[in-house]
Amino acid sequence: MFFDTHAHLNFKDFYSDREEVAERCKKKGVHVLNVGTDLESSKEVVKMAKEHKGFYASIGLHPLYVKSADFSGEDYKKIFSREVLAVGETGIDKKGENIKKQEEIFREQIDLAHELGVPLILHCRRAHNEITEILKEKKEKLGGKERGSGVIHCFTGGKKDAREYLELGFYIGLNGIIFKMDLEGAIKEIPLERLLLETDCPFLSPRSDIKRNEPLFIEYIAKEVARIKGISKRDMANTTTENAKKLFGIRQKTSLLVK
């Protein structure tokens, strides 16, 4: 079994065959956490999670969208349901604008996750220092080491960055970026029990001959991370699936995920 902990099947890239992709996932035993990027897309991922067994949702406002959208925690609380496993993706993206507003809304989404009792899905682009500073400031609102504070999605940092996120109770999410950047040193030092796998589909395809990424391709990520960690692909799949279930509290929230 594989668990893709970060997908965007609600994006337009999947408009023509979303149901077929979902059925392929279910047939192959790939469970999927679809991630919202604003209020409307968050509503879509919740709807999809309710319609498909083994699919889940995360709700939040992506830092690149703060320019065109305001954030209201009350609006997101209205769409919260048992299928919602996390808040995000949220964080800071220095490629975007309005960094101060990004930081403000990031803080608000940390508060929302704390109120809802779910972990965070973090987006970071060239902002590790700023993000960890805010996380330390809000440390009492994080889930902590026992429950897990969340996941740093699409990790691109170094060993020091990984250690800081781990110390704050976060898991490390790895995807196709590992084929584009040299992250082996950091990956070798991250404990296996704190790793998650993701595709970030339709982006970051793990192979040059595959243009549109999708959850089934999580297998390529698992194979490469398993090579780096010196274990079998099967053990990588099983361990990271258990990690996801633990972080997102799936046993407590729902019985949808079964082997």
Image (tube, helix red, strand yellow):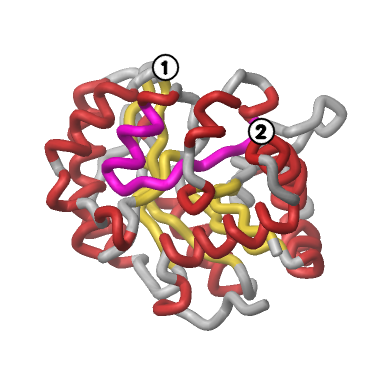
Residue at position x 82%, y 25% in the image = 208
Q: Magenta includes 69?
A: no
The residue beneath circle 2 is: 176
Tell whether 126 sits left or right of 154. Answer: left
Q: Secondary structure at mark 2?
A: helix
Q: Quadrant of residue 127?
A: top left
Along the line of sight, the residue nearer the viewer: 133 or 194: 194
Structural crowding at the residue carrying mark 1, measured as other residues with C-alpha within 10 Å and reported as few (<14), some (14–19) or many (≥20): few
Which amino acid, mark 1? Lys
- Is 126 drawn above or below residue 252 in the view shown? above
Q: Which of the two labelled residues, at mark 1 and mark 2, occupies the earlier sequence position?
A: 1
Which amino acid, mark 2? Gly
Residue at position x 29%, y 54% in the image = 145
Q: Secondary structure at mark 1?
A: loop
Residue at position x 74%, y 51% in the image = 233
Residue 133 in the image: x percent, y percent? 19, 29
Structural crowding at the residue carrying mark 2, measured as other residues with C-alpha within 10 Å and reported as few (<14), some (14–19) or many (≥20): many
Residue 152 in the image: x percent, y percent? 42, 39
Asked whether the residues under the numbered discs 1 and 2 touch, taking CB atoms below 8 Å apart as contact, a structural biologist would say no
Label ID, residue 12: none
Of badges 1 and 2, nearer the viewer stands: 2
Residue 29 in the image: x percent, y percent? 74, 67
Q: Which residues are drawn in magenta?
A: 161-176
The residue beneath circle 1 is: 95
Q: Magenta includes 168?
A: yes
- Is 197 drawn above or below residue 239 in the view shown? above
| Mark 1 to mark 2 CA distance (whole Å) | 20 Å
